[in-house]
Image (cartoon, rainbow, N blue to C red):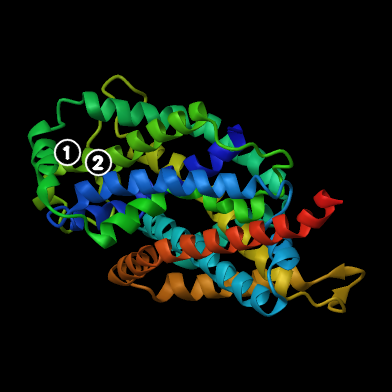
């Protein structure tokens, strides 16, 4: 399995650790979250296998090229617009969550507009880069921040403040049937391979998933998924986390580095995840922008031989982001992310169906040539 494909999946998993997803999982702790985690892990790995396998049939092609070649024209535009809006909201939710985290924990005196504008400068530059450059950038960021994040997780498991009785109580909830909301929220964490709808353009020789690659990916997903849910509970318990919107921020603030330069590692922890958040936003909005421009592109909308279609879309992206971040409440972002997670499974099923349809039509178009 290509390391860049691994990055697409890992960035999505780690970014959701400090987002609203852990809060959704903990909120459903007594209604089947534990079984939902295990079920999402199994289903997520199966869907990941099929996604990689299907996109390997179209080397160097994104979803716009695949659809236009193999799907009726009347369906291609609505499908691409639907996926464009889906990926835009995924990036928007990350932006809102991380902007509120900065505002609440790092710079409470700063204007929220200033925080969002700071993201504008960085993410806009990233969105306009090529898919290959975004993947190279994600590699650099992961190499820098992943060892520290893993160290914090390991230190959390070894901390004397971790109450394993809380973890055992959480595990005992395995007797409840899976919850659909917890299941889809967990599934969203492990389904980062869906970004292949655009980033497959980079993989000109994407291989089918190997047994070794899927084993490593499954073990990584298992560790991150279980850590995302159980470690905050081990430090706070169910009752203390009932009113906590960002459980992992509270968890990281409970971990101390006694002999470190900075004893409270929460600030470095947030900084590391902010870097991953920028990469995640860049990936999602890059996908959204590429899908949108494949449907709507104004050829005559130019200024000094530079087409302004993409800058126009970016202006709309940020205008919506500014308004949403300023007006949405904490409960509003929780409800919005929860609603989006509920429809993630149908979205992936639609994506698989479209790729299967394109694969069948592509095979049928090649059949007469092989007979000749």
Which percent across, then down, holds residue 7?
Answer: 55, 39
Can you name the residue that lies furthest to the front here? 371
State whether residue 351 appears in this view.
Answer: yes
Can you name the residue that lies furthest to the right here? 305
Identified at 78% across, 54% down, the residue is 366
SS assignment at label 2: helix
SS assignment at label 1: helix
Identified at 14% across, 37% down, the residue is 167
* Residue 251, disc: 2
Identified at 34% across, 30% down, the residue is 152
Work out whether residue 2 or residue 275 is closer to the camera in this orientation and state it.
2
Work out whether residue 163 or residue 55 is closer to the camera in this orientation and state it.
55
Q: CA distance from mark 2 to mark 1?
A: 6 Å
The quadrant holding residue 5 is top right
Which percent across, then down, holds residue 219?
Answer: 38, 31
Which percent across, then down, holds residue 259?
Answer: 30, 19
**Is 115 situated above or below 51?**
below
**Is 1 situated above or below 176?**
above
The answer to whether mark 2 and mark 1 are in CB contact below 8 A is yes
Identified at 7% across, 34% down, the residue is 165
Going from N to C along the chain, the mark reached first, 2 or 1, is 1
Q: Is residue 194 left or right of residue 229?
A: right
State whether residue 124 appears in this view.
Answer: no
* Residue 235, disc: 1
| Neighbourhood count class around disc 1 (C-alpha, 10 Å): few under 14, some 14–19, many 20 upward | many
| Neighbourhood count class around disc 2 (C-alpha, 10 Å): few under 14, some 14–19, many 20 upward | some
Work out whether residue 292 or residue 214 is closer to the camera in this orientation and state it.
214
Q: Is residue 134 left or right of residue 344?
A: right
**Is 347 situated above or below 198?**
below
Can you name the residue that lies furthest to the top here? 259
Which quadrant of the figure contains the N terminus? top right
The quadrant holding residue 327 is bottom left
């Amino acid at each position: 399995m290509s390391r860049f494909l691994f990055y697409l999946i890992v960035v999505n998993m780690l970014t959701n650790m400090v987002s609203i997803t852990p809060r959704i999982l903990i909120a459903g702790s007594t209604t089947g979250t534990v079984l939902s985690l295990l079920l999402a892990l199994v289903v997520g790995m199966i869907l990941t296998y099929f996604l990689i396998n299907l996109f390997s049939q179209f080397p160097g092609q994104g979803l716009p090229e695949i659809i236009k070649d193999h799907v009726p024209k009347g369906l291609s535009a609505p499908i691409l617009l639907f996926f464009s809006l889906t990926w835009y909201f995924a990036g928007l939710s990350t932006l809102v969550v991380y902007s509120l985290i900065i505002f609440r924990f790092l710079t409470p005196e700063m204007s929220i507009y200033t925080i969002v504008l700071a993201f504008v400068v960085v993410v806009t530059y990233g969105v306009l880069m090529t898919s290959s450059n975004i993947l190279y950038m994600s590699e650099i960021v992961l190499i820098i921040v992943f060892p520290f994040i893993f160290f914090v997780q390991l230190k959390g498991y070894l901390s004397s403040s971790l109450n394993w009785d809380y973890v055992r109580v959480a595990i005992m909830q395995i007797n409840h049937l899976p919850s659909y909301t917890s299941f889809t929220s967990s599934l969203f964490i492990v389904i980062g391979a869906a970004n292949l709808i655009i980033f497959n353009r980079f993989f000109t020789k994407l291989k089918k998933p190997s047994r070794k690659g899927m084993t490593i990916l499954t073990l990584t997903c298992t560790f991150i998924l279980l850590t995302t849910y159980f470690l905050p509970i081990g430090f706070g318990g169910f009752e203390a986390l009932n009113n906590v919107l960002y459980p992992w921020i509270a968890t990281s603030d409970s971990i101390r580095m006694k002999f470190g330069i900075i004893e409270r590692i929460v600030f470095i922890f947030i900084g590391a995840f902010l870097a991953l958040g920028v990469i995640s936003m860049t990936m999602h909005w890059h996908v959204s922008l590429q899908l949108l421009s494949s449907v709507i592109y104004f050829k005559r909308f130019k200024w000094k031989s530079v087409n302004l279609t993409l800058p126009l879309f970016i202006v709309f992206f940020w205008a919506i982001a500014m308004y949403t971040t300023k007006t949405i409440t904490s409960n509003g972002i929780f409800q919005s992310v929860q609603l989006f997670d509920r429809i993630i499974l149908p979205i992936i099923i639609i994506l698989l169906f479209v790729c299967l349809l394109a694969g069948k039509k592509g095979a049928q178009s090649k059949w007469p040539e092989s007979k000749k």
